[in-house]
Structure formats: C-alpha cells, structure tokens
Image (cartoon, rainbow, N blue to C red):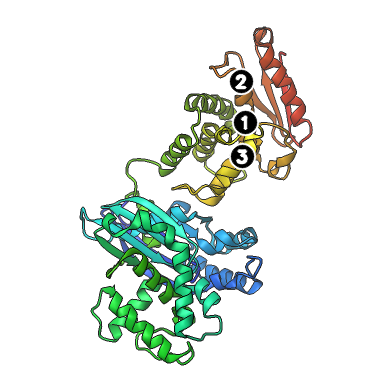
Amino acid sequence: MQTGQRLAAVDLGSNSFRLEIGRVEHGDFHRIEYLKETVRQGGGLDEERNLTPQAMQAGWDCLARFGERLAGFKPHEVRAVATQTLREARNRDVFLQRANTVLGFPIDVISGREEARLIYQGVAHMLPPSDERRLVIDIGGRSTELILGQGLVPRVMESFRVGSIAWSKRYFADGQFTKKSFEIAEIAATAVLDEAFDAYRPDNWDTAYGSAGTVGAIGDVLVAAGWPAGNITQEGLDWLLEKLIAAQSADKLRLPGMREDRKAIIGGGVSVMRSVFHLLGIERMEMAAGGLRHGLLCDLLGTSEKAGDLRVKSVERLATKFQIDRVHGERVGKVALHLFAPLLAAHSDASGLPPDRLQRKLLWAAQLHEIGSHISHSDYHKHGAYILDNADTVGFSLSEMHRLSLLVLGHRGKLRKLETELADDSLTLQLMSLRLAVLLCHARRDPDLDGLQITQVDAPARHIRLRCRAGWATSYPQSAHLLREEVQAWQKTAWTLEVTGL
C-alpha cells in the first residue's frame, strides 16, 4: 500500500452498520472519517429466520448512504462484511443482491470463526506490543466471539449464538427489568457458553479485553457514574444490574451515559456480559479500542498475516482433519489447472472474478474434492459439499466456501443437480476442468497429457473441444471410456463437450 492511498471497511453488524475510511501513511492506517448507523437488523428476523421487508429496507437505505461516500474508491480499497444476522437469514441472498448494488462493492458474509479472527486482529493491532496471553471478548447483537491469542496471533477462536439483541428479544421482550428475568437470561447464556470453559479458563490467559458495542455501552454508563475509565469490573456490573432492576423497565431507565438507542437492548447485553464474567472467572475486563472493522483494515494493509494467504492454511487444516490423500489432491489440482488455463485465456469472464482467484478456487476444490470420503465412499461428493458449506474456515467468506462446495458436489455424477449454477460460465469452466482432471487421474497416478489439447470452440454456443493425439485412446482405454461417458453427461446441459481422437 502506497502512502496516501485510501482504504475503507464496512461492517454490517446485527445492531449497527459501520463505515471507516482512512489513508495509508508510511504503512499505517489513519482514520479520516467514521460513520455509524443503528440499523438493528438483528431484530428484524421473523420466526422463520427471514429478514422482514422493513429490516431489509433499513439496511439498503443505510448502505446507499455509505455507497455515496465510497464513490470513487477502487475495488481493492474496500472490504465489506456481514456477520451473524446474515449468517442466519434464510433470505440473505435477496438482501445481498440489492445491497451489493447500492453499496457499490461486494459484501462477504463471514463465518463465526472468521469474524473472531478479524476481531482479534483489530484489537491486537491497537494494543501496545506484548507477549501477554490475551482473552478477547466481543458481545454483538446476535453472537459473542471469544478469542485466545498472544501478540498478533489468534490461537483459539469461537463464536456463540448469544448476543444483546437476541437475548433482549427473548428475555426482555416487554422491556421489563426484574431480578427473575435477569437470572433466567444469565442461566440461558451460560448454557450456550458453557462449552467454552475448558478452552478459555482463567489459567489460559493473562488479561481479558472487551471489544465493540455492548462493552462500550456498559463502559460509558459506568464512567458517567464515577467508575474508573477503561475497564469493566464485576462490582461495576453488579451496580449496573441493581440500577436496571430499580428502573423496572427500559422506558423508565434514566442513567447518565446511556444512549437512547441502547436502552432496548441493554438488558440482554448486561445478562450476557455477567454470564461471561461468571463462567470465565473474569474480575476485570480492559476496554479495547479495536474491533472487526480494524481487522478488515489490517487485512487490506496486509499486516494481519504476512506469512501468506490464510485460506491456504485453512485448506491444509481441512485436509489434515479429514485425512485426505494430499498427493492425489495435488495431482488432480495440477491437471485441472492445466486444462483450465486455455479455457480461461479464451473466456471473457462475466463474473468479474480475477483469473488468479478463479485458479486458486479451482486448485482448492481439487485438493478437497475427496473430503467427504472420510464419512462414506458412497456419495462422498455430496458429503464433501455439505462439509464445505458448513465448515468454519478462517479467511474464507461463506460465498467462497459455497463455490467450493458446488465444485466438489459437481466433480462427479450427473450434472442435473447443478443445472441452475451452470448459467455461471466461469463456474462451469472450473467444473468441467475439475471433472476431466478427476477422470484422467482415475488410476491415482500422473496422467499422460501429451497431445491433449482443450479449447473453447464457440463461446456463445458454450462448446468445448478436447483433442486426443493419435493412439492415446488405445494406450489408455479406461480413460477413453470415461471421456465418452463425460461427453454424454454434458449433452444434458446447455454446454457441449466434444472429444476427438477416441
């Protein structure tokens, strides 16, 4: 990043949407503008986990305002992510289709662990250098992230479906504050977070840090009441609980430092915070300045992971966890990229994805195409697609993982199951390259590619031709048989595969 270059991070949280804009100065980011709007989209999920029309409209309106401010920014200068609410929303694609347009930049829905990683990076980069073992806690609207790390490196990352909006809707829906309602809310939060105790117990960290909205809201009230600035203590939480119960309801709550837009969700936030303190034995939590959007900016700057693409490490972890034959995965990937290269060179990509990104995703799909075999060899491609669609993988957005799952699902068997997705030309060319690579590597050894040439003969007609040298089919009769079957498989789609020389 050059000095003077602009960068921007957009965080679509369950409670607030935030936009941070700044410039790079000698390798560091310096803020020049910060916008925040309380959209409270996390409260707009109905009983079927669909975003209501009102919730979607509020989000679009906010993003349109952000989009106007981001006019003139280049794609590599902006990163936008959405978190738990859109992870849950069944109709998120409907929201995102328009949201991407009004913002002017693609919005990635990230997994809980990826959110946790970004939060830690944002917090750690805004703290003084230290070797202390850190516990970072972020209580959001619909999820709570817990991270253990040291220095700039996160070690353990988890996301739990408990947050200030969700708990306020469930246990303080009428806005009434009673001792009993807080007891029930804390017990429920502890039940969700209980599995975190072993990994996050007190002897695993030296200092606890709190990030984001709930921490800030509680801290503002405590400071206004005369408590020391910069941290939250158990005594302070006990005092605040007494004040909330004494007020009896959110409408009657009058506390210095309490913003109006926080009153409706403070009950849920306090109950979750008290649960975390009790469960993990926290006596004092330091308030951290960094958060998710700062982690996004670290990624844009390239300071969060100098060792390389985090997604490569995630693929390696999945390969290890599911005991994949790595040698064969690499073999299939090498052949798939060999076949994909001439198709990519001749193809005008309508998806807008850069060629190197298309190649990387094809390679990762090849490396992981047998991931489902660990469950069962029967229909392993279906098991593999399910694993990838539901895995928490650091560095990947949910849309990226879904694309990998589609390639794994379609690498064998009938193509009817991907009929809709075959309208995406770049995905189809990736898929064809992967399917051909898998069948050419069927003997689990390097195939003879000498004389095999693949070309896109007619782009509008979606016609692909694979030429085999004279005698190739005689030397490799099983491969020739599989290629003939593959030609028939594509005849039932809008695409045509022609193989000559068989």
Query: In the visual, does 476 lie left or right of 175?
Result: right
The residue identified by callout 3 is: 383
Helix, strand or loop status at disc 2: loop
Q: Position of residue 364 (x, y in %)?
A: 51, 36
Helix, strand or loop status at disc 1: loop
Q: Type of residue at label 3?
A: His
The front one of 279 and 415 is: 279
Q: Position of residue 31 (x, y in %)?
A: 33, 65
Residue found at x 29% / y 63%: 208
Q: Type of residue at label 1?
A: His
* Disc 2 from disc 1: Cα separation: 15 Å
The residue identified by callout 2 is: 442
Q: Type of residue at label 2?
A: His
Circle 2 crowding by C-alpha within 10 Å: few under 14, some 14–19, many from 20: some
Residue 377, label in figure:
1
Q: In the picture shown, does residue 451 fall above or below 383?
A: above
